[in-house]
Structures are given as C-alpha cells and as structure tokens.
Image (cartoon, rainbow, N blue to C red):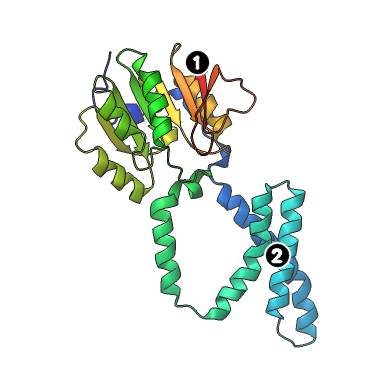
Amino acid sequence: MHLPSSPDQDLKPCPNSQAALPAQRRPHLRQLALQFAALFVVVALAWPYYGMRNEALPWPATAFEIGAVALLIATLSRQPWWWRVIHALFAPLAWVVAELAIDPGWFLLAAILLLLVYRGALSGQVPLYFSNTDTAAALADLIASRSQSRFMDLGAGVGSVLCPLATALPDAHFSGIENAPATWLVGKLRTAGLTNCTWRWGDIWQANLAEYDVVYAFLSPAPMSALWDKVVAEMRPGSLFISNSFPVPGIEASHVIDLNDARRTQLYCYQR
C-alpha cells in the first residue's frame, strides 16, 4: 500500500475539502457577541437613568440583569440548554469573582493551563474525551479484518486509542493528529517507541483523509455534519469512517457496534 512520501503529505487538504470547513469553528466568538449584546442593552438603558441622577450603576443588580437579558437572547436564538445556563450565570459570577480581588496572574495561569489541554473545545466545540480499552479492542477487531490498514485518529488526545492499536497490530500503520499542546506532548511521548505509529500536531480540518482506509473520531455533536462532508469529499470507496458516540446527523450508519462498557459506548460505522 502506498505510504506518504513526507510526514506532512497527509496534512494537505484535498481541494474539495475546503467546502467542508465548518462555520461553527469559532462558536466562542458568537457566544461572546451574545454576552456583549446583553451588556450593551442593559448598560444603554440603565446608564442614562443613573447618569441623570448622578449615581453609579448598582453593579450587583446590573450583573443579574445582564444575565437575565443574556438568557433571554440565548433562548430566543435557540441555544442548547447548557449555553443558556452559562449565559445566565456569566455576568453575576464575573461580578462575584471581581469582588474577591484575586490577583489577575492566577486567572492568566488558569487560562493558559486550560488552553494547553482544552484548545479543541475553544476552537471547535470539541472537548477532551478519552477512548477506553473496550473501544480500542473493538477497533482492533475491525482493523484486523482489513489487510495492511492505514488508520487515522482525528483529535487523538493522549494516544489512548493509537497506543494499544499500534502495539496489538504491528502490520498496520496508525496516525494521530492533535492540536492541544499538553495532550499532543503526552501522546508524542507515549507513541515515541512505536515504529508503526505517526503522531502529528495539526488541524483535523487540514488532514487529507484520502490516505487512510479507516478514520476514527471521538469529537462532539457540533462538527459531525461538516466532518461528514469532509469524509465524503476525501475518503476513497471501500474505506470506513467510525464515530465514537456521536452519529452523523441525517445519515444512517452502515452498522453500529454496541460496547459492554460502563457508559454503553456506541461506535457508528459508515462504509464509504
């Protein structure tokens, strides 16, 4: 089977894949815009009133009013329930934390640490999920039935899938791509001694899926439609796309593997 001539070859997107890049890759900007809209509405209405009375804004009440308006906008725009809770609590909690007078350096440190681990949640609504040993075992059975498989893990985390697979199936080739610095480093160290495993830093939307006959993803519901467009545009006939826990909306899986683990994992398999 053809192997890439250079480590970067399979990070070059196919020309048709650009249409699959999801608009929701910057959802945090839309949510921030919603909060700023709520802030603007409340302050624009309250400032003239208190300004004419030569009084300062009553920030505890103002913070809760901003939360209420943000909740209203989130509800009208049909945000998921967890976003509604976040929007309702954001301004009140920000005011409470401000009253604690915590050194700003601690917030900077916390933000850096979170970004190192959860960068995917910020850039594409993809939190860090760990695939368990039952999932790795089920994937190993699938890959073993395909001769000389080339396997790609999109958003490979710390290598919880690639490490056991590469160890169990030395004749197959495994690649993982990750963009969160801390988890990428852990995965890089874990896979360093595996000759049949390639560990890459990069954006899953720039990876060329045409080089692989099995592609695995454990992401979130948010990017699945756009990822399916990329799969259709790039993966070859006869290849297999597997999504852990999150089906592709509106597309019936070729088959579903039900695992007997604690959280009743389901692997949605889509034959190209």
Give the number of marks.
2
Q: Quadrant of residue 136?
A: top left
The residue identified by callout 1 is: 271
Inspect the image, locate mark 1, and give the three-letter code of the amino acid beneath it: Gln
Q: Is residue 161 visible?
A: yes
Relative to the observer, which residue lies in front, 53 or 176?
A: 176
Percent x, y of residue 237: 45, 11
Percent x, y of residue 189: 24, 44
Indicate the secondary structure of the residue bearing disc 2: helix
Quarter holding the N terminus is: top left
Q: Residues within 10 Å of mark 2 (few under 14, many from 20)?
A: many
Task: Say left or right for 138 vs 83.
Answer: left
Inspect the image, locate mark 2, and give the three-letter code of the amino acid beneath it: Gly
Distance from disc 2 to disc 1, alpha carbons, whole Å, reads: 46 Å
Q: Which residue corresponds to the image point at 42% horizontal and 55% vertical from the top-left?
A: 115
Relative to the observer, which residue lies in front, 4 or 50?
A: 4
The residue identified by callout 2 is: 67
Percent x, y of residue 163: 30, 34
Q: Which residue corresponds to the image point at 43% horizontal and 15% vertical from the top-left?
A: 239
